[in-house]
Image (tube, rainbow, N blue to C red):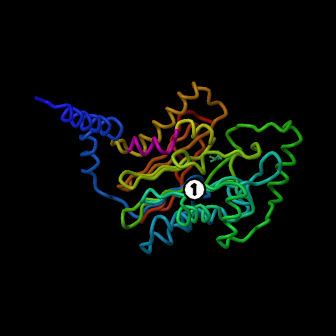
């Protein structure tokens, strides 16, 4: 006869099994994953054409056997330190009050992560995010707290103001009525994911965010699970585009979870875009979002709501910019 204790034991095992097959993929899918071989490492992927230069920075580390974590940090620093870039770093377009505020996050193969938001006057937010990850018990620091932490860690204050960005903002003020706008053009991020020679994955994401945003607005880029997610057993994903839309579907996290269930990186990027469109009740006229994904086997994919998104890819054989497939033409 079954005792109450036995029953509880069986139920617990039963619910664990249900959890593992529905939330984390069936046995068959797990087997499908196991049967694949790592075909391609090291490899680095990043968003938009500024990714080409960023990948060069990452490749210096990857080709000498360095870690994906160092590679993604050094890679996106290249873009942050390019003050001609209007969507990343201190050269980025400001908020509607004329202040450039920066968001960044980083995640490694041990599920460690760090993030900064609403950071001002610091050239390399990604390195501050890494310090948050490594030197604090926290994951996110924002605003003055993030700034003070950066200064305490020896990051210098940088008062650079981009003339080009300030001029664009002045132009915007003329007709904007001070209203933040959502369109397909006024944002871009450098998101980077990499697989190193040891088979470890990491990712980094950094941006000045949506231009002319409300003061204090954070997008998806500093939010683990939205702008970036890495699970070393499965893969990594990163987002660019309208952050509000990405947060609504926990974009990067669902991509990694779909890969866990055996879907390819290309399939999952497409599925995430389709889910995003449905969750916006098909009203995506002004909404561009692009995703990139990389799995443990060096397979990768990218997909966007609208045409025009491109992805920089580098591995041992090639270094190229690829136009992403998309759901609808521009
Ligand atoms: N995702 C960024 C944000 O919403 C901007 C972008 O990638 O275009 O802040």
Q: From the top left corner, tell me how far across and down residue 57 is, in percent.
A: 56, 68
Disc 1 secondary structure class: strand
Q: Is residue 317 visible?
A: no
| Side of 128 where 171 appears, left or right | right
Q: For disc 1, does the CB lie below 8 Å from ligand 1?
A: no
Name the residue at 29% across, 48% down: 33
- The quarter of the picture where residue 308 lies is top right
Q: Residues within 10 Å of mark 1 (few under 14, many from 20)?
A: many
Q: Main secondary structure of the magenta part?
A: helix
Whether residue 252 appears in magenta in the rendering, the answer is yes
Position of residue 269 measured from the top left corner of the image (x, y, whole percent): 47, 42
Location of mark 1 (residue):
105
Residue 137 is left or right of residue 8, and the answer is right
Q: Residue furthest left?
A: 1
Q: Is residue 308 magenta?
A: no
Q: Is 138 displayed left or right of 142 in the figure? A: left
Q: Residue furthest top?
A: 281
Q: Quadrant of the N terminus?
A: top left
Q: Position of residue 251 (x, y in %)?
A: 51, 41
Is 299 positioned to the left or the right of 33 in the image?
A: right
Which one is in front, 148 or 26?
A: 148
What span is colored magenta in the figure? 250-259
Q: Position of residue 95 (x, y in %)?
A: 77, 48
Q: At 65% from the left edge and 30% from the top edge, which residue is drawn?
A: 285
Q: Quadrant of the C terminus?
A: top right
Q: Is residue 132 visible to the viewer in this orientation of the structure?
A: yes
Question: Closest to the observer: 109 or 268?
Answer: 109
For residue 65, above or below residue 14: below
């Amino acid at each position: 006869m079954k005792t109450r204790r036995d029953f509880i034991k069986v139920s617990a095992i039963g619910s664990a099994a249900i959890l593992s097959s529905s939330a984390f993929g069936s046995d068959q899918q797990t087997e499908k994953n196991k049967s694949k071989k790592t075909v391609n490492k090291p490899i680095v992927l990043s968003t938009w054409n500024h990714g080409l230069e960023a990948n060069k920075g990452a490749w210096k580390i990857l080709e000498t056997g360095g870690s994906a974590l160092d590679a993604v940090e050094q890679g996106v620093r290249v873009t942050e330190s390019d003050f001609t870039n209007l969507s990343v770093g201190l050269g980025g377009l400001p908020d509607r009050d004329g202040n450039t505020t920066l968001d960044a996050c980083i995640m490694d193969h041990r599920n460690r992560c760090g993030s900064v938001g609403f950071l001002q006057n610091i050239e390399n937010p990604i390195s501050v995010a890494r310090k948050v990850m490594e030197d604090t018990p926290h994951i996110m620091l924002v605003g003055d707290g993030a700034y003070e932490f950066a200064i305490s860690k020896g990051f210098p204050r940088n008062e650079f103001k981009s003339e080009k960005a300030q001029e664009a903002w002045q132009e915007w003020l003329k007709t904007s009525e001070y209203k933040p706008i959502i369109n397909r053009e006024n944002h871009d991020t450098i998101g980077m994911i990499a697989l190193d020679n040891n088979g470890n994955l990491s990712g980094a994401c950094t941006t000045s965010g949506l231009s002319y945003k409300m003061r204090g607005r954070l997008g998806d880029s500093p939010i683990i699970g939205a702008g970036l997610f890495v699970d070393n057993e499965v893969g990594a994903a990163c987002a660019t585009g309208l952050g509000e839309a990405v947060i609504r579907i926990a974009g990067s996290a669902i991509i990694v979870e779909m890969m866990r269930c055996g879907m390819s990186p290309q399939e999952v990027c497409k599925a995430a875009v389709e889910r995003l469109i449905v969750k916006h009740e098909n009203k995506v006229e002004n909404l561009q979002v692009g995703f990139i994904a990389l799995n443990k086997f060096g397979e990768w994919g990218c997909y966007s709501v609208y045409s025009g998104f491109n992805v920089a890819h580098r591995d041992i054989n090639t270094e190229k910019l690829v136009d992403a497939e998309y759901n609808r033409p521009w």
